[in-house]
Image (cartoon, rainbow, N blue to C red):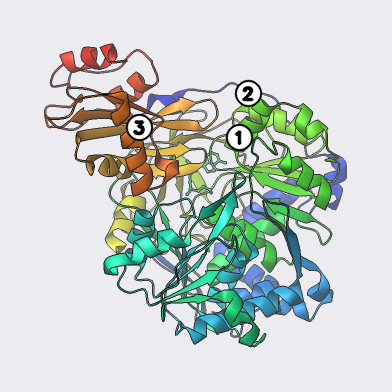
Amino acid sequence: MSHPEIESVLHEDRVFEPPTEFASKARIKSLDEYNQLYEKAKANPEQFWAELAESELHWFKKWDTVLDWQPPFAKWFVGGKINISYNCLDRHLSTERRDKTALIWEGEPGDSCTFTYAELHAEVCQFANALKQLGVGKGDVVGIYMPMIPEAAIALLACARIGAPHTVVFGGFSAEALRDRLVDGKAKAVITADGGFRKDKAVPLKVAVDKALENDGAPTVEKVLVVQRTKEAVTMVPDRDYWWHELQPTLSTECEAEQMDSEDMLFILYTSGSTGKPKGVVHTTGGYNLYTHMTTQWIFDIQDDDVYWCGADVGWITGHSYIVYGPLSNGATVLMYEGAPRPSKPDCFWELIAKYKVSIFYTAPTAIRAFIKMGDHLPQKHDLSSLRLLGTVGEPINPEAWMWYHRVIGNEKCPIVDTWWQTETGGVMITALPGAIATKPGSATKPFPGILADIVDHDGNPVGENEGGFLVIRYPWPSMMRTVYGDPNRFRRTYWEHIPPKDGEYVYFAGDGARRDEDGYFWVMGRVDDVINVSGHRLGSMEIESALVSHPAVAEAAVVGRPDDLKGEDIFAFITLEGEYEASDELKVELKKHVTGEIGAIARPGDIRFSDALPKTRSGKIMRRLLRSLAAGQEVSGDTSTLEDRSVLDKLREGA
Ligand code: PRX
């Protein structure tokens, strides 16, 4: 195994059974029931998914073929006609859910609003009509660069309604990163806001859009729809930029949902890989709708009186699948929050849970670790008794953080679902079903029904119990990514040929290391490639290296992850300078700023070390394994015999 860290076996034998009371009312009530579902799905996945697609979703026209699998390209519900915005909105309107709260929104300064399903439907229709008026139609890609305001969710649903694939770019990304994505996605329009509120400040967004579009930076973009949030001054370009609040009163609250092919593209979402620029992960309509619907229902055990809160940003896949599409497709009440804990309001999360009687709360380990640091007294000041289920996502959760979550937030009565998945998988793949599967702190537990997860070695051979290996999926599932936008070969190479196909069987390589214990529980250890997971945000080391070397002072850069108590991993950059530049603290500051400008603050290196040379093999490959050890302050272990110049290591150590 190339990464010794995935072999480290965590010893953890605490087990938490689903609380009896919870299980008795849960969607999936027992291990037996889970096992039966799992076996049924395994025996005939197509039939399993088809039955659910039929009973759980609205189709304008039923499909002809459930699955067309030409490895590694899958099509689900071929010939079916569907619209995910219809499934999230219209079909609830003829039921008692019509006047149920769909969305509760809380702004950072404390302003708030709610939408019933009928009201949300009307807003989405108006928004869709605005897009149409700006010339956006079926098949046109729309960039979305928004703060966490209701219009972010409305924009997604409006695009889906008219069949315009969206590509959401996280509001924390820079103008440069936004431009790259708009260009790659060939976006025709951009939806943005003047700004949003973050840490008690108004943070601009429209200026970044202006910058991305200046000098014809993204030539396919014709129109920009701007939502007013902060009321800070912005420049509006005539015939390009339009205020949403000026258009809205003129627009009809009806807009028929387009009948989309099941396999029509629903969205592109860019994510980092170990090589090259970020990839546009393509998701399509029918399979994604079904899988996010079922996972939301069974994993979050959505009941009609739940108030569900997922703390992610709409800019990430978690926001797409588990703030917008999955919960609304189930007719849930969703809380959306613009802000984050900050010195002036360290307990804002707990305050919100008490204020809105949140019953299901889904967040990331990095947030949990930050809460632990802030102290138990903060959550203890608030009434959290409405909570009945907790979830975590984004990175492995350390058992101590899990236990704190269980004890202090869950009052030892809420099951915890640790959900393993990825942008590429569209929905959760490995997780407990809270009424059925006993949990172990740090384990994502078992695969969702229909997901054939396994752990294999380099050649694709299954490894033994408790042995480390690569996490793979053996069979297509409805919400799997369909391709890398514009680059099907990269899709094939990266995900399906990394483990060589055997006898025509292709397996999906997730890029994570894992082991399976004696009870069949999965323990995900983290990435085995050069992807760094900073506070649950996924960044490619090559991307950050490219950003660094685009600065005139930098000759060469190598970026690795370093373990961090709070963020999980932090970014550590080793740099050699061009001849005329001298190492200095000022230059470190400047380089960090440069990366922020090129990618965004989430990619800013936590530490930079200057050096005369980087450790390389004789063939010129940077030995990141050594750099990882150095960054972590560990002894460099393992084989260093391929190192070209051994004195480089000593110098790097001295530079510490
Ligand atoms: O390494 C795994 C980690 O996050 C990666 C996927 O990142 P992204 O596409 O940004 O999606 C994050 C939200 C779904 C995975 O390859 N990861 C995600 N969830 C977990 C996790 N690692 C361990 N346990 C998890 N529950």
Classify residue 234 as left or right of residue 277. Answer: right
* Residue in front for this viewpoint, 76 or 243: 243
Query: Mark 1 near mark 3, Cβ–Cβ under 8 Å?
Result: no
Q: What amino acid is at disc 3?
A: Val
Q: Is residue 63 visible?
A: no
Badges 2 and 3: C-beta atoms under 8 Å apart? no
Residue in view at x 31 percent, y 33 percent: 559
Q: Position of residue 140 (x, y in %)?
A: 42, 78
Q: Earlier in the sequence, mark 1 or mark 2?
A: 2
Query: Residue 265 is drawn in which quadrant?
Result: bottom left
The residue wearing badge 3 is 589
Q: CA distance from mark 1 to mark 3?
A: 39 Å
Q: Residues within 10 Å of mark 3 (few under 14, many from 20)?
A: few
Q: Quadrant of the N terminus?
A: top left
Q: Are marks 1 and 2 in contact (CB under 8 Å)?
A: yes
Front one among 591 and 609: 591
- For the C terminus, the quadrant is top left
Query: Which mark, residue 371?
Result: none
**In the displayed structure, does residue 52 sit left or right of residue 436?**
left
Q: Which residue is mark 1?
A: 443
Disc 1: CA contacts within 10 A as few (<14), some (14-19) or many (>=20): many
Quick one: 53 or 594, which is closer to the camera? 594
Label 1 vs 3, first from the N-terminus? 1
Image height of 543 relative to 104, above or below: above
> From where the camera sits, is residue 618 visible?
yes
- Residue 344 at x, y percent in the picture: 68, 37
User: Disc 2 and disc 3: Cα gap in Å?
Assistant: 41 Å
Q: Residue at x 59, y 83 (%)?
A: 257
Type of amino acid under label 2: Glu
